[in-house]
Image (tube, rainbow, N blue to C red):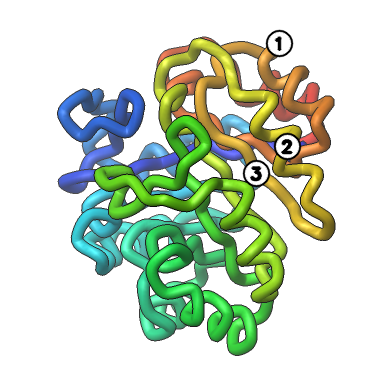
Amino acid sequence: MEIIPAIDIRNGKVVRLYQGDYRRETVYGDDPVAVALAWQQAGALRLHVVDLDGARTGQPEHLGVIKDILKRVDVPVQVGGGVRSLETAEALLEAGVHRVVFGTAAVRDPELVAAACARLGGDAVIVGVDARDGMVAVQGWTEGSSMKAEALVRSMARSGVRRFVFTDVSTDGTLRGPNVAAAAALMKVKGVHIIYAGGVGSLEDLARLDTTGVDGVILGSALYQGAIRLREAVARFGG
């Protein structure tokens, strides 16, 4: 099970949001490149970078910063936030991104995601499934939808998507524990790989998620607040 540090960028700074609320932001650094290098040095084998401003506007707002991260780190980087066209996805991959994350587009323009899988390959495409109470949130978590998380996963899997990042928005940033039941439910969808995010606050939480068979867990607040030490988590759960 991969342990993947999150680097969420807003206004050029590394931040964490509480339950996806842009009004409840904590800043953890003003240099995303330095943060990326620090996580790599601490044992990260992959990084998860989110352009929060891009998620709201619908187009990348921090491409320069992301490119700087890619130039400096040696580990694979997956990037989301504002990926709503093939051109944007291709630009990120050409810059050196390992995987691109489609979020809002998966709900509002599913044909685009299917086209991305066909053109870029399933290994390069991730769909981000951000959910509150089982229902998918879009537009940088600021709007709801009428689609259930499991239905979106099944639909996107039929379009060729192999890998999903599932975020339980209601627990994200709280350190109160993950939604293990939701992760386990998505793992029942055949042929998909699930990376979980949201609420993880201890090594015990990671152990509970490990029993579901998820491919990985994205850690944010738990790392930034020191509740989990990255090197220890990577050593225990295998990277």
Residue 49 vs 64, above or below: the answer is above
Write down the residue under mark 1. 204
Q: Are marks 1 and 2 in contact (CB under 8 Å)?
A: no
Between the C-alphas of marks 1 and 2, the distance is 20 Å
Q: Earlier in the sequence, mark 1 or mark 3?
A: 3
- Provide the secondary structure element on which disc 1 rests: helix
Is residue 12 visible in the rendered image? The answer is yes
Using the rendered view, name the quadrant where residue 32 is placed. top left
Which residue type carries mark 3?
Ile
Pick whichever of labels 1 and 2 is earlier in the sequence: 2
**Earlier along the polypeptide chain: callout 2 or callout 3?**
2
- Above or below residue 10? Residue 79 is below
Three-letter code for the amino acid on which mark 1 is drawn: Glu
Q: Is residue 88 left or right of residue 118?
A: left
Residue positioned 63% across, 48% down in the render: 150
Quick one: label 3, few (<14), some, or many (20+) residues within 10 Å? many
Q: Residue 57: where, in percent of width, then height?
A: 19, 61
Q: Residue at x 60, y 83 (%)?
A: 120
Q: Give the spatial CA distance, label 1 vs label 3.
A: 17 Å
**Residue under pointer 2:** 185
Q: Front-most of 33 and 62?
A: 62
Return the x and y of residue 41 as percentages of the image width and height: 56, 36
Residue located at (68% from left, 24% from top): 180
Residue type at mark 2 is: Ala
Q: Which quarter shows the N terminus?
A: top right
